[in-house]
Amino acid sequence: QVQLQESGGGLVQGGGSLRLSCAASGSSSFNTMGWYRQAPGKQRELVARVTRDGTTNYADSVKGRFTISRDNAKNTVYLQMNSLKPEDTAVYYCNARVPVPGQSTEFNYWGQGTQVTVSS
């Protein structure tokens, strides 16, 4: 059974930094892994994602401030968040896609979410 264990959220002042981690287990292979966030009253949105070969993709709102990385040996994805702003406040969810054996499709898994709160 695939599980995604997130850690690293918390309360930080504006301009500060946090590092999120997500350790994935239960599969021998993970394709794209990433981070999404959902603020109160808003839809869940992509923050950043990284493919197995290291290709990254960021939301415009976090470019230049956030960095996503992964350690394939540990099946872990990280999100380094710098220069945090109050508008970054949200629940951050880890996402991982697992290939379906013998097919071109993927299973899509989510973590339970970790709260990030940025004070002004």
Image: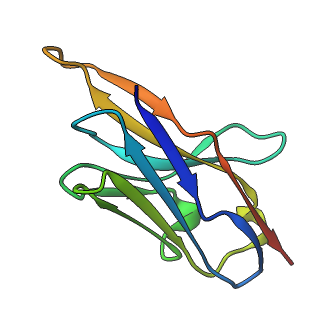
Residue under the image location 43 percent in, 51 percent down: 23
In the figure, residue 120 lies in which quadrant? bottom right
Q: Pinpoint residue 5: horizontal percent, then vertical percent.
A: 52, 47
Front residue of 7 and 78? 7
In the figure, residue 45 lies in which quadrant? top right
Compared across the picture, whether 84 is left or right of 108 comes to right
Q: Is residue 37 above or below residue 7?
A: above
Compared across the picture, whether 81 is left or right of 14 comes to left
Q: Pinpoint residue 52: horizontal percent, then vertical percent.
A: 22, 49
Residue under the image location 55 percent in, 40 percent down: 111
Q: Is residue 77 above or below residue 120?
A: above
| Count of numbered labels shown in the rendering | 0
Compared across the picture, whether 115 is left or right of 49 comes to right
Q: Is residue 108 above or below residue 67?
A: above
Way the structure is coloured: rainbow
Quarter holding the N terminus is top left
Q: Pinpoint residue 42: horizontal percent, then vertical percent.
A: 77, 40
Q: Please, which residue is most extreme toward the left here?
A: 102
Residue under the image location 68 percent in, 83 percent down: 16
Q: Is residue 4 above or below residue 102?
A: below
Front residue of 69 and 84? 69
Q: Pinpoint residue 7: horizontal percent, then vertical percent.
A: 58, 58
Front residue of 116 and 28? 28
Residue under the image location 31 percent in, 51 percent down: 75
